[in-house]
Amino acid sequence: MEILSIIFFAIIIIYSIFIVWISYGFNKVKLFEKENSKPITKFSIVVPFRNEAENLPGLLYSFSQLNYPRALFEVVFIDDDSDGTSVSIIEKFPALSFAFQIINNERRSNSPKKDAISTAMHFAKNDWIITTDADCFVHPDWLLTFDDFIQKTNCEMIAGAVTHDAEGSFLHQFQQMDLMSLQGATIGSFGIGKPFMCNGANFGYTKKLFAELNGFKGNNTIASGDDVFLLQKAIRQFPEKVQYLKAFSAIVFTKSLNDWKALFYQRVRWASKSSSYDSGFGKILALVVFAGNLAIVVAFFLTLFSMFSFWNWYLLFALKIFVDFLLLYQTGKFIQPRMVRHFVLSNLLYPFFSTAVAFYSLFGKYEWKGRRFKI
């Protein structure tokens, strides 16, 4: 058992070093303060959707509230084989004062989302593309902040923050904590100069850069990853063109899922792409996080059978939750001023949930938007 203790503590110490490093990187990314620059950037907002009748009104309303010249942006909705209800909601939504198009998705690969974005490239009228999801809503100054950031940095790819519109239930709070950890890792990786992850619900780039990267060529057999693979391509070829926009007014809010099965499949979908990362750092970090969670889980079950000291397991868990808190606290101050409720309980459940997701993502299948995908 002494050997097991050494192994488990070594894993958690390595995990802690990585999380502290990421936390350091988080603070290296400076908060961007929008100024009152004259808007000049023309945007095409791309929204793939499939049977989103429940969510589209919230997104459409937030678009209608954007404080941005109507002549400088359009919305390109890509219909991924929805029923007629979703399209009807867009067409009949009152007070749509902005230009929009509804285009049918042209399926060419195993990834509906990547196909949708590739389809949008043929119809988008403006050079700057910003992707978001149908279950999101945006800040009124979202485009103003992107525009000001572009004017100041001359970048060609921007990753932005995403957070949950979380309610009080444990499920929603658990999702919020999980997403906060991913957002913290995303921002921190930019801060230490090793970006490997972003979220397609708040992701911008120029059509020129998309063409130079050959779009999703090379990874369109993987159903997910319309965001991270494109980012990793850009980092490999044009790192100077990629920036993270850390600004309150650029945060996108997404709805929380309402059942554990849907959450599990969503996280499996996200995890399934990690083995195909082009980023060596991304692969190593994913492995370290998996090992850290697995160590907590294995030690817990050994404790139940009196094969491992409870106090040693408690120390492992306490060390992990302490370093996790460092990153989550910093991230929370940025994207979610109120700390997540049920923090300890969520952190107790998280290693078991995360480990199950990791193992399932290696062998299983998942359902998403009424379709079943093989990993």
Image (tube, rainbow, N blue to C red):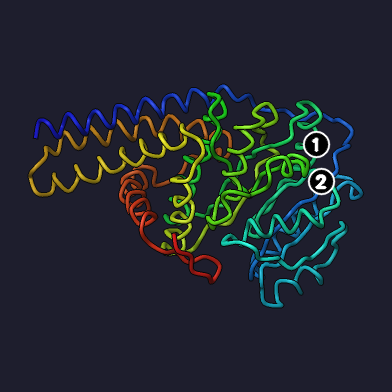
How far across and how far down the image is residue 269, in percent? Answer: 48, 56
| Up/down of 364 relative to 8, above or below | below
Q: Quadrant of the N terminus?
A: top left
Numbered circle sitting on residue 302: none
Q: Which three-letter amino acid code belongs to the residue tagged 2?
A: Phe
Residue 129 as seen in the image, left or right of residue 301: right
Q: Which mark is residue 43?
A: 2
Give the quadrant of the C terminus. Answer: bottom left
Q: Earlier in the sequence, mark 1 or mark 2?
A: 2
Residue furthest right in the image: 71
Q: Which residue type does callout 1 highlight? A: Asp
Density class for disc 2 (Cα within 10 Å; few <14, some 14-19, many ≥20) is: many
Does 293 appear above or below 221? above
The residue drawn where x is 60% and y is 46% is 227
Q: Nearer the viewer, residue 357 or 24?
A: 357
Q: Secondary structure at mark 2?
A: strand
CB under 8 Å between discs 1 and 2: yes
Report the residue at 53% width, 70% height from top. Answer: 371
Q: For residue 343, which quarter of the picture?
A: top left
Q: Is residue 5 left or right of residue 154?
A: left
Q: Nearer the viewer, residue 253 or 233?
A: 233
- Whole-percent x and y of residue 348? 31, 45
Q: Position of residue 257 (x, y in %)?
A: 51, 60
Q: Which residue is mark 1?
A: 147
